[in-house]
């Protein structure tokens, strides 16, 4: 029987024991299962299920995300190419009319000649394709499937173009709209299939598969693990099993081949150690309440959660069907901002970073040289910080302190001028000469733009606190801290935030908590823009910097 409770790791790295939860040791190697049909059932069929080991370093991007981004670029190119070829074909069919009243390509793109202008065509195209799910890489399983989906999408785009032409009173002819649909299908089809084949056919540096862990050890779990291995070409990779019923003695009848990652109660350690991106529940005896609890924990870490259907009833109100090849799973939706809001925020961040890059890159090179010449040690300070959902990531700053500053901090704790987890000291002896300047001007924060481009951080969001500081937190002792931690797990940390623009080091930890909660609960793109604009004078005049 399943134990009445277990040890649960929260996002802050602390362990909370649920009622009657015995300690469950993790085992490297095989495990035994008792009962029937799952982790609580009969033995797994003798199918070799050796998992793929995690990569030595965290990937910059997943195959699924790369595929989605390439589809966006391909469709953007397809809109322009299709409009251009439509214009060429129309000129060829109407040579006499074109000679008398020529229509330039600029008229087509900007003034709505033949077709709606490009700034209307692009939203129609992307809106229809997004609505029909054509940017979901899980649907790209074969060339025929892609072409079938493209046909449906182009039909929707043509309908949208006709409606827009009517509403905006644009003199688009049926011929030009028909040509746009024909060439749109050809262009988008060729580009989409090219993206599919290029992503599937060769490895990309810094790109990795979505690593899937399976909860359970029964026949259903073994079957699912086998299917995930089959769908490796779709960007999936089997990472191993997660199960509570672990023993110290290997059972040769269960061919896990080192595939058991640990118990459910150690989910945070498993996700971070094995770089898990997706967890699938197959255990037929997994209680609904515990599934919801597991889903919430993984949601905070940014890990997708699904279950094999028809095991037990609906466990949450926000669910959808996720298709991986011909495998249907019930997918738990993440409790967070809408997808449109997140993409707008991401687009806002990347656009600002790229626009500022020509000015910031020379500045960053100058700071890097100054840091290197000023004192011995590396240019960058790389620290482990908790990001979205408590998932740890590498956090970059220009080094502003001497080597070994973390060890020296323990001797300076009595001189701390802040409260809570923050350590602030006016005349910190660990800071180097260049460090004083770059901290005062916030130039030490510039490398975090790398974190933004990698997707670990946003430009605006709660500041990421060090992992070592979170370990010291007693969230149970301060309910507002626990609520703050739960809320910040739903968003990515940021380079700047309300705390930065309203006082920085002049404000205490409790005030930072209040401002973080306010930002998370009241976020808008307009608020982000206001914070970015307010950050500039704060940095220029070094307000609250130490």
Image: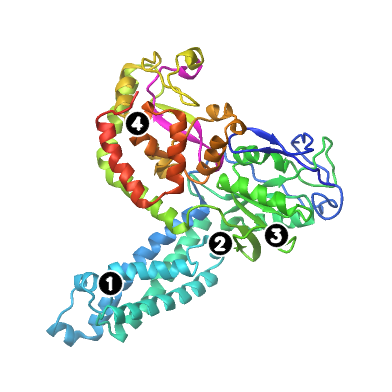
Instruction: Check the image and report above or below for 351 versus 364.
Output: below
Q: Which residue is mark 2?
A: 138
**Percent x, y of residue 35:** 87, 51
| Residue 345 at x, y percent in the picture | 39, 51
The residue under the point 64% across, 66% down is 326
- Local packing at callout 2 (Cα closer than 10 Å; few below 14, some 14-19, many 20+) is some
Q: Distance of mark 4 from mark 1, alpha carbons? A: 53 Å
Say whether residue 399 is magenta.
Answer: yes
Horizontal side, residue 483 vs residue 345: left or right = right
Q: Which comes sooner in the sequence, label 1 or label 2? A: 1
Mark 1 vs 3, N-terminal side: 1
Residue span colored magenta: 384-407
Q: Which residue is mark 4?
A: 503
Q: Nearer the viewer, mark 4 or mark 2?
A: 4
**Numbered badge on residue 308:** 3
Q: Quick one: SS at disc 3?
A: loop
| Image quadrant in which the C terminus is located | top left
Q: Position of residue 88 (x, y in %)?
A: 25, 77
Residue highlighted by disc 1? 84
Residue at horizontal 67 percent and vertical 53 percent from the top:
280
Foreground mark, 1 or 3?
Answer: 3
Q: Secondary structure at mark 4?
A: loop
The residue carrying pointer 1 sits among few (fewer than 14), some (14 to 19) or many (20 or more) residues within 10 Å by Cα, namely some
Query: Given contact means CB atoms under 8 Å apart, are the residues at marks 4 and 1 in contact?
Result: no
The secondary structure type at the circle numbered 2 is helix
- Asked which colour scheme the image uses, the reply is rainbow
Which is nearer the eye, 140 or 518?
518
């Amino acid at each position: 029987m399943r134990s009445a409770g277990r040890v649960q790791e929260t996002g802050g790295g602390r362990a909370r024991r649920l009622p009657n939860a015995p300690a469950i040791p993790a085992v490297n190697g095989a495990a035994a299962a008792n009962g029937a049909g799952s982790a609580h059932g009969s033995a797994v069929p003798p199918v070799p299920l050796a998992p793929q080991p995690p990569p030595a370093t965290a990937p910059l991007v997943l195959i699924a995300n790369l595929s989605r981004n390439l589809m966006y670029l391909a469709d953007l190119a397809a809109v322009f190419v299709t409009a251009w070829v439509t214009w060429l074909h129309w000129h060829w069919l109407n040579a006499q009319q074109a000679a008398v009243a020529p229509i330039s390509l600029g008229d087509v793109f900007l003034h709505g000649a033949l077709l709606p202008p490009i700034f209307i065509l692009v939203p129609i195209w992307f809106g229809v394709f997004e609505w029909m799910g054509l940017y979901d890489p899980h649907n790209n399983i074969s060339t025929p499937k892609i072409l079938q989906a493209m046909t449906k999408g182009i039909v929707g785009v043509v309908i949208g173009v006709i409606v827009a032409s009517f509403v905006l009173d644009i003199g688009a002819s049926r011929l030009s709209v028909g040509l746009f649909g024909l060439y749109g299908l050809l262009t988008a089809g060729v580009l989409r299939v090219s993206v599919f084949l290029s992503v599937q056919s060769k490895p990309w540096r810094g790109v990795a598969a979505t690593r899937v862990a399976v909860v359970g050890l029964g026949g259903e779990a073994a079957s699912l693990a086998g299917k995930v291995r089959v769908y490796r070409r779709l960007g999936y990779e089997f990472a191993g099993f997660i199960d509570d019923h672990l023993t110290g003695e290997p059972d040769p009848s269960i061919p896990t081949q080192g595939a058991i990652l640990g118990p459910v109660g150690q989910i945070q350690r498993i996700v971070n150690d094995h770089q898990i991106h997706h967890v699938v529940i197959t255990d037929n005896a997994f209680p609904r309440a515990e599934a919801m609890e597991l889903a919430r924990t993984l949601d905070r870490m940014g890990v997708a959660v699904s279950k094999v259907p028809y095991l037990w009833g609906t466990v949450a109100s926000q669910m959808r069907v996720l298709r991986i090849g011909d495998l249907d799973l019930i997918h738990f939706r993440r409790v967070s901002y809408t997808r449109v809001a997140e993409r707008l925020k991401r687009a806002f961040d990347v656009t600002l970073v790229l626009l500022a890059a020509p000015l910031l890159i020379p500045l960053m090179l100058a700071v890097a040289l100054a840091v290197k010449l000023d004192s011995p040690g590396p240019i960058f300070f790389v620290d482990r910080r908790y990001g979205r959902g408590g998932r740890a990531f590498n956090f970059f700053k220009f080094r502003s302190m001497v080597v070994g500053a973390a060890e020296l901090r323990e001797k300076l704790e009595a001189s701390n001028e802040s409260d809570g987890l923050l350590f602030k000291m006016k005349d910190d002896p660990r800071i180097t000469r260049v460090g004083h300047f770059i901290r005062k001007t916030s130039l030490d924060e510039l490398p975090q733009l790398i974190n933004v481009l990698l997707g670990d951080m946003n430009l605006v969001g709660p500041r990421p606190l060090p992992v070592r500081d979170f370990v010291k937190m007693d969230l149970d002792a301060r309910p507002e801290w626990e609520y703050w931690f739960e809320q910040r797990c739903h968003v990515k940390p940021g380079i700047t935030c309300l705390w930065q623009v309203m006082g920085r080091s002049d404000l205490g930890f409790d005030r930072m908590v209040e401002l973080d909660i306010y930002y998370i609960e009241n976020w808008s793109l307009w608020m982000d823009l206001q914070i970015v604009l307010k950050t500039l004078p704060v940095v220029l005049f070094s307000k609250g910097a130490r």
